[in-house]
Image (spheres, rainbow, N blue to C red):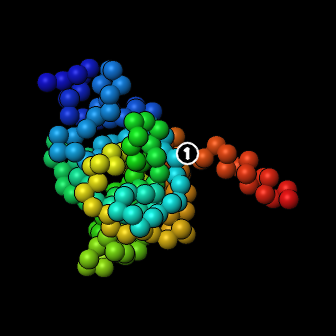
Amino acid sequence: MSHGGRPRWLPDRRPGTLAGVTSSGAVPVPERGGAVDYRGGIKPDYAPRRDNHADPGEVVWAWVPYAENPHIGKDRPILVLGRADRGGLLGALQLTSRDHDGDSRYVPVGSGGWDPSGRPSWVRLDRPLAVAPTAVRRTGAGIDRRTFTAVVKAARLAAPTVVRRRPGLVRRLVRRLAR
């Protein structure tokens, strides 16, 4: 029933780990397919394309387990930030249409094609997710670059070890400024 003093269904919250990773390093996949809590690195890269594949900068739908009990969950929109460090997964953050004004764990992203009702949405910063591209149920819509950049900046403040800067980005910016 328990493993190391914690129930098996509780995610592993150590930095740099995928929740529930096996000792062999296998990537956990929920029985239903979908997202898992993620503590590895995510390399953000704004690159939405209208190709029916989940790309960074797009809101897509996937099955996301509830934080309290990962055995149950629901389909929900998630914002793809970029590639996760492990297993060919996408790094993402979940969206909600519940009002979270004033809550520092959320960033408003407005409304978009991912919500047919046109309700404003918020991105949850404190629960990074990883999802296999094949587990994405449907694509929603892209968000604009300015909103994506604001989410990435806020996510870096909330989880600096998870949302990483691209290694060559600073070097390229310095070269560009030196020209």
Residue 102 appears anywhere in the view: no
User: Is residue 44 toward the left or the right of residue 179 in the image?
Assistant: left
Residue 31 appears anywhere in the view: yes
Tell me: residue 105, above or below residue 7.
below
Q: Which residue is mark 1?
A: 164
Residue 99 lies, in percent from the top left, at 32, 70
The type of residue carrying mark 1 is Arg
User: Is residue 179 toward the left or the right of residue 161 in the image?
Assistant: right
Q: For label 1, count other residues whose C-alpha is less than 10 Å away and answer few (under 14), some (14-19) or many (20+).
A: some
User: Which residue is painted at 18% across and 24% down in the image?
Assistant: 2
> Which image quadrant for residue 87?
top left
Residue 124 lies, in percent from the top left, at 38, 57
> Which image quadrant for residue 14?
top left
Residue 29 lies, in percent from the top left, at 25, 38
| Residue farthest along the right direction in this orientation | 179
Name the foreground residue: 84 vs 71.
84
Tell me: residue 101, above or below residue 62.
below
Name the foreground residue: 4 vs 62.
62
Residue 54 lies, in percent from the top left, at 38, 57
Q: Quadrant of the C terminus?
A: bottom right
Tell me: residue 142, above or below residue 67.
below
> Which image quadrant for residue 115?
bottom left
User: Which residue is painted at 20% across and 34% down in the image?
Assistant: 9
| Residue farthest along the bottom direction in this orientation | 118
Q: Quadrant of the N terminus?
A: top left
Q: Secondary structure at mark 1?
A: loop
